């Protein structure tokens, strides 16, 4: 299949791309599973509490078993005691979900294909700014009639990255930084030809 390469104020040209990467049928279930797995992998799961066995102290029986009139107790670290452990203590958890590499690549290809069908994917020869200034980036986006977009550049343009940090709705990454959540949440995706070729190489 072919995709158009946009040129501001100029004539568009066509570039040949792989049907496997940009012509795949949209698989909603696979994309959903991939997004869930990606978000789950980003969870820390480091919140934890101490149970009665993890709290220090409490090795001695606080008072004798009978004759005090109090309820029997074997340790001062019981959950009902002050400074005792937590009854159902939280544990460090691993929230990551297994997802095959083949499935992840297929999901990205499905998303890219859907972006192309919805005219949300814009291919350009290159997208860069000469100096790290927000104004220059906004002018560059205005040439394509855009105000917010995900810009995929390969290799990463440092000036472009610095210029975008102060602009709401504009995100810049290289091919290695592409993920399903970024692609889905972006109203428009701008991609250079070099980034396009790299993505085809990775997803093929």
Image: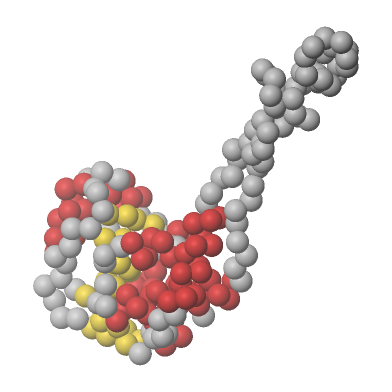
Say which quarter of the image contains residue 85.
top right
Say which quarter of the image contains residue 14.
bottom left
Q: Residue at x 67, y 38 (%)?
A: 88
Relative to 25, is 145 above or below? above
Relative to 139, is 86 above or below? above
Residue 153 horizontal/vertical position (percent) = 36, 62
Q: Is the image coloured rainbow, by chain, by secondary structure, or in one colour?
A: secondary structure
- Lateral position of residue 95 relative to residue 202, left or right: right
* Relative depth, front residue between 63 and 16: 63
Question: From this viewpoint, which residue is outermost toward the bottom?
Answer: 1
Q: Count up the numbered dots.
A: 0
* Relative depth, front residue between 32 and 156: 32
* Relative depth, front residue between 156 and 204: 204
Residue 156 horizontal/vertical position (percent) = 39, 57
Residue 19 horizontal/vertical position (percent) = 42, 88
Q: Residue at x 32, y 55 (%)?
A: 171
Q: Residue at x 40, y 81 (%)?
A: 26
Residue 26 seen by the camera: yes
Q: Where's the N terminus, which quadrant?
A: bottom left
Say which quarter of the image contains residue 112.
bottom left
* Relative depth, front residue between 149 and 155: 149
Residue 127 seen by the camera: no
Question: From this viewpoint, which residue is outermost toward the top?
Answer: 68
- Lateral position of residue 11 relative to residue 31, left or right: left
Question: From this viewpoint, which residue is outermost toward the left?
Answer: 9
């Amino acid at each position: 299949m072919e995709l158009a390469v946009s040129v501001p104020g100029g004539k568009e040209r066509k570039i040949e791309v792989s049907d496997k990467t940009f012509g795949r049928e949209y698989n909603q279930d696979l994309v959903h599973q991939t997004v869930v797995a990606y978000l789950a992998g980003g969870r820390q799961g480091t919140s934890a509490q101490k149970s009665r066995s993890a709290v220090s102290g409490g090795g001695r029986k606080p008072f004798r078993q009978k004759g005090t009139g109090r309820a029997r107790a074997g340790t001062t670290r019981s959950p009902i005691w002050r400074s005792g452990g937590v009854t159902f203590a939280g544990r460090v958890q691993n929230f990551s979900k297994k997802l095959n590499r083949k499935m992840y690549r297929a999901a990205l290809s499905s998303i890219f294909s859907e972006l192309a069908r919805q005219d949300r994917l814009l291919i350009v020869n290159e997208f860069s700014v000469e100096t790290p200034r927000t104004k220059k980036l906004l002018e560059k986006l205005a040439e394509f009639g855009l105000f917010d977009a995900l810009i995929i550049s390969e290799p990463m343009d440092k000036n472009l990255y610095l210029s975008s940090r102060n602009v709401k709705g504009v995100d810049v990454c290289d091919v290695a930084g592409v993920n399903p959540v970024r692609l889905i949440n972006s109203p428009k995706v701008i991609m250079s030809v070099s980034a396009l070729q790299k993505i085809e190489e990775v997803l093929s």
